[in-house]
Amino acid sequence: MDAAAKAFTETAIAEMYARCNENAPNYGVSADAFASSILKTIEKRLETASVEPLTAPEIGEFLGNLQADDLFLALGCAAGNERAWWEFDQTHRSYMERFARHLARGDADPDEVIGNVYIELYGTRVVDGERYSKFGTYSGRGSLRGWLRTIIWHSVVDQHRAGHSEVSLDEMTETIGEGAAHAAFAIPTPDGDSQMVEQVARDKYRSATAAALSEAFAALEPHEKLLIALYHVDNLKLREISRLVEDEASPLRGWIKRRSSAREKDPSARIHESTVMRWLEKSYERILDVFKKDLTVRQGLNADEVEICIGLASADLAGPDLYRDLAAG
């Protein structure tokens, strides 16, 4: 785009951000993040499809059709903002459940579908040191609910495929590739002198890793240990944990009442999967912080050695044994 179109775009986006931020000031979305998302979409959808430089009227038409408020909410959720997630739950949760029930037929479980969607939306994968949220793929070009319908539909299809014996190579790679890689790394097979040396090095760092993990788990609060045990040892789904928390007899109940401002305002408010994911995420962050500190401060490892231990810990965490030890302790 030329200089005039660029200036128009910057001004228009700034005005859109001001309106969205005035309507929802607690979503924690920065002006830079908002502008970056829109400019990325303009580059991908408009500039690559146009031979001539974009004009101000063309950009104005595009921005006029953008679902700015939906995009603002999605960016807040992608960043893990609690207020944005609360608003998302209140506005879209019941609609998602109805649509999932409508799509789910036969062997598809609508509750599990929604649980899987929430995991995707919150994000459990870390890419270049940052948590990857599915919300990051929403551009605002259509309504958020329309985009959610697509995500739910894919989850229903994935669940249906998982229940059948015929699975393609692509599906297998997507589903178990990373776990298989972890398992292969966790149990190396020496072959030759060089691999034997590598195994000795792994054994050396494995003891350091185990000690640091022990310290990290010991530093968790009781409710964090219970939460991790419910999810990883008892294999409860996020929805099942949220229902458990709502039970007055739950050992997590008292902690939730102290920590949740939303429930202080509305004691009858439901606990949703995204909330449980945020609690788990905070527990994982605490584990990682204590883990790194133990390796560097107490054990005196350097940055490269810490990375080796993180790789070993990732392999160990792929299996349930470590979490069983946590639950037993």
Image: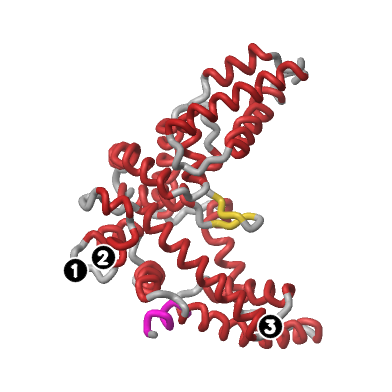
Q: Which mark is residue 249?
A: 1
What residue is at 36 percent from the left and 48 percent from the top? 114
Amino acid type at image mark 1? Ala
Task: For label 3, count other residues whose C-alpha is less than 10 Å away and answer few (under 14), some (14-19) or many (20+).
Answer: some
Q: Position of residue 31 (x, y in %)?
A: 59, 36
Residue 234: x, y in percent?
34, 71
The answer to whether mark 1 and mark 3 are in CB contact below 8 A is no
The residue furthest left is 248
Mark 2 and mark 1 in contact? Answer it, CB < 8 Å: yes
Residue 214: image location, x then y, percent: 51, 83
Q: Which residue is mark 3?
A: 202
Viewer can see residue 60: yes
Viewport quadrant of the N terminus:
top right
Q: Is residue 200 left or right of residue 282?
A: right
Judge the density around disc 2: few (<14), some (14-19), many (≥20) Cα neighbours within 10 Å: some
In the structure shown, which secondary structural element does the residue marked by tag 2 occupy? helix
* Residue pointed to by mark 2: 253
Instruction: Give the quadrant of the C terminus.
Output: bottom left
Q: Secondary structure at mark 1?
A: loop
Q: In this rendering, is residue 208 above or below 165?
A: below
Q: Residue at x 69, y 22 (%)?
A: 49
Residue 225 colored magenta?
no
Q: Are marks 2 and 3 in contact (CB under 8 Å)?
A: no
Considering the whole magenta stretch, tell me its main secondary structure: helix
Q: Amino acid at mark 2?
A: Arg
**Residue shown at the point (66%, 87%) measured from the top left:** 203
Q: Which residues are magenta?
A: 322-328
Which mark lies nearer to you, 2 or 3? 2
Q: CA distance from mark 2 to mark 1?
A: 7 Å
Q: Is residue 168 above or below residue 193?
A: above
Left or right of 60 in this view: 124: left
